[in-house]
Amino acid sequence: MRGRQPCEPWIPEQGLDGIGGGGGTIDEHGALQNSTPVLFVATGFQHRRARDSSTVAAAVLAFRLMIRPTPFHPRTSALNETGLWSHWAGHLAANRYQESDKFEYFAVRSAAGIFDTSPLYKYRFAGRDAERFLAGMLARDVRACPPGHAQYTTWLDDRGYVMEDGVIQHRRPDEYLLTSAEPNFGYFADRIGRLGVTIEDVSSQIGTIAVQGPRSRELLARLVPSVGETPFFGITTGQIGGIGVTVSRTGYTGDLGYEVWVEAADALTVWDILWEAADGYGVLPFGLAALYMLRIEAGLLLLAVDFDSSRYAFNDAHRSTPIELGWSWMFKGLADDDRAFIGRRALERELADRTSRWRMSGLVVDWEDYDRVYGAAGLIPPKVHAPVHEDWMIYDEAGARVGYATSFMYSPVLQRHIALGRVRPDLAKVGQRVQLEFTVDHHYEKVAANVVRLPFFNPERKTG
């Protein structure tokens, strides 16, 4: 058995030999057949030898659950011309379907694209105290989200640092659905206490398709007519081919868009009807590569790239408050909000004492300066649309470090190099000039950039 690198999925070869035992196979039910109950189990960089049957069974179950297909996988795999996949929350997610992810990107910006968002974790909260419970757990006031609407939200630790973000849907008077990028069932379930609320992990029970782009409303309204009247972050219900669906006007592209929620057992039928209806609309499936381009233009943050969960951060330098991430708009009514939610006191102190260390800001690179720096090295300035997700230092005009960029790309629509970056609060003002550090021909160089208001791309159709 080979070792396991951090964040690298380990997929065992077929049979127990591939796992490190004495032969045998795993049948379709995940049971060991004709095998010796000996297994090497990887734990970080160390291996331990397991001889008892319970450990073997647990390890085999872990292998089976490691990578799972989404309810739409039979269709997305048939459309994936590249065979390139990524691992997202234990699921296979298409990296890109076409030879160039720009085909998919432009489909979303000019017509419509379809994306499988099923890997998101989904939790259903129900009961007479559901609103009361969530009002104390989520930092944004969920009481301001009436039935039939959704809300972008976040939850904090008791020091006011962001644990995660997600979207909460108020589906019925006493029922909510929360999505998240990381597992959070235990975190919420352990805090229910005696309140009249239940939480259910419905992640595997629901398939979700994002239909995004300027023609998304026109397309979906053919199948679910009420979509045409659904407001931004609104929710409607209907039927596609006689199958009940929920449609939310939400997404991660910063464009006009919707997400279709359906029971997993009916997912393929809904996909087939939607795909057939999409004929003639210029629709393409799009993968993670295109999504990451779209979300940067939209100024939408990515967990583990633009911010870290406070649960996993190494230290406070890797933690962020919602104010630092640019989410102060969530708390405009905080003075009149009587909720006792987790992290409130720390949040109020930060606002009162102005102790924020930075602000998440948009940066647009000065093209003339960019051209000058590359030209001096005898190079043609690159226009690489693939996002760069790494820290690039930001300096003021005097050369002092004042922050760092977390996501960078060349925007095909805006035709500018753009970045999401953490900038010292006194410099996080629209029009402020800073210096962004690049590596040019193996040398560090600084290029001028201007602070701009997020999002970079904000068409009227998104909310209109």
Image (cartoon, rainbow, N blue to C red):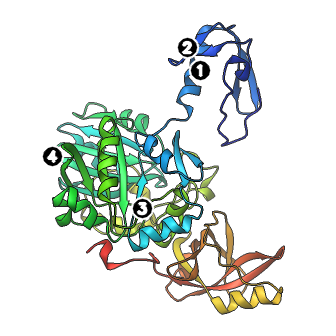
CA gap, disc 4 to disc 2? Answer: 44 Å
Q: Residues within 10 Å of mark 4 (few under 14, many from 20)?
A: some
The answer to whether marks 3 and 2 mark residues whose Cβ atoms lie closer than 8 Å is no
Q: Amino acid at mark 2?
A: Ala
Q: Residue at x 19, y 56 (%)?
A: 224
Q: Earlier in the sequence, mark 4 or mark 1?
A: 1
For label 4, the SS is loop
CA gap, disc 3 to disc 2? Answer: 40 Å
The answer to whether marks 4 and 1 mark residues whose Cβ atoms lie closer than 8 Å is no
Q: Amino acid at mark 3?
A: Tyr
The answer to whether marks 2 and 1 mark residues whose Cβ atoms lie closer than 8 Å is yes
What residue is disc 2 on?
31
What residue is disc 4 on?
173
CA gap, disc 2 to disc 1? Answer: 8 Å
Q: Residue 388: which numbered mark, if any?
A: none
Q: Amino acid at mark 1?
A: Val
CA gap, disc 4 to disc 3? Answer: 26 Å
What residue is disc 3 on?
252
Q: Is residue 149 above or below residue 36?
A: below
Q: Earlier in the sequence, mark 2 or mark 1?
A: 2
Residue 261: x %, y % from top left: 30, 47
Residue 345: x %, y % from top left: 40, 56
Q: Amino acid at mark 4?
A: Pro
Quadrant in the picture for residue 211: bottom left
